[in-house]
Amino acid sequence: MARLQILELPEGAGDDRPPFVLVIDQVPTDEDKFDAIRRDLGTPEDLVERIGARAVLVFEDTIEIPANDTSAYLRDSFPADAHYEMTITEHPEWNAAAEAQAEAIARVRQLHRPVEYRGRGTICAACSGWDGSTTDNSPCGYEHCPTLLALNGEQERT
């Protein structure tokens, strides 16, 4: 089941509300289930416009956002006879690091984007050296892109 998370971004001058990125993780790899989620959410542009997010990031893997970790507030994690004073501390460096990581992953995914190759299937633009009409390298099937497989925590398929 896909999860929705919010990654808050640092506020800038003129922001009337805190900016954020919508992170959708644990997206199913099954084509029909993924298409159902895609239909429910609409296009990324529509989704960004409807909810006011700066961007939408979608991952098959689980993405843990440190700022969203609430495990410290779970009652069972504290001994019954101990008293703890809890202080909420913001960690803008975590948000900045998570934002930078998400932006880097988005840039890699854009570089290693799927392109149709002469009606014979989908290839990875970067691995194939795609220039819009030809490839510099042997065509690399998109599902075999070693960079995307590494991002997804998978090994290259043989």
Image (spheres, rainbow, N blue to C red):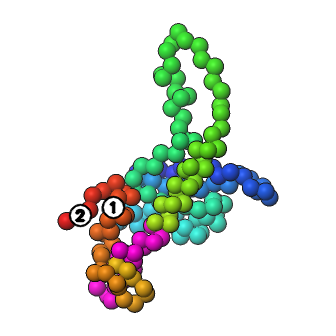
Residue at image coords 40%, 90%: 133
**Position of 79 relative to 144 (above/below):** above
Q: Position of residue 129 (x, y in %)?
A: 37, 80
- 93 and 44: which is toward the camera: 93
Label 1 is placed on what type of residue? Leu
Q: Position of residue 81 (x, y in %)?
A: 53, 9
Q: Residue furthest front?
A: 136
Residue at image coords 48%, 23%: 77
- Left or right, 60 with respect to 24, comes to left
| Quarter holding residue 152 | bottom left
Label 2 is placed on what type of residue? Arg
| Magenta region | 109-127
Task: Mark 2 or mark 1: name the one nearer the start of the chain.
Answer: 1
The residue labelled by disc 2 is 157
Q: Residue furthest left?
A: 158
The residue labelled by disc 1 is 149
- 132 and 51: which is toward the camera: 132
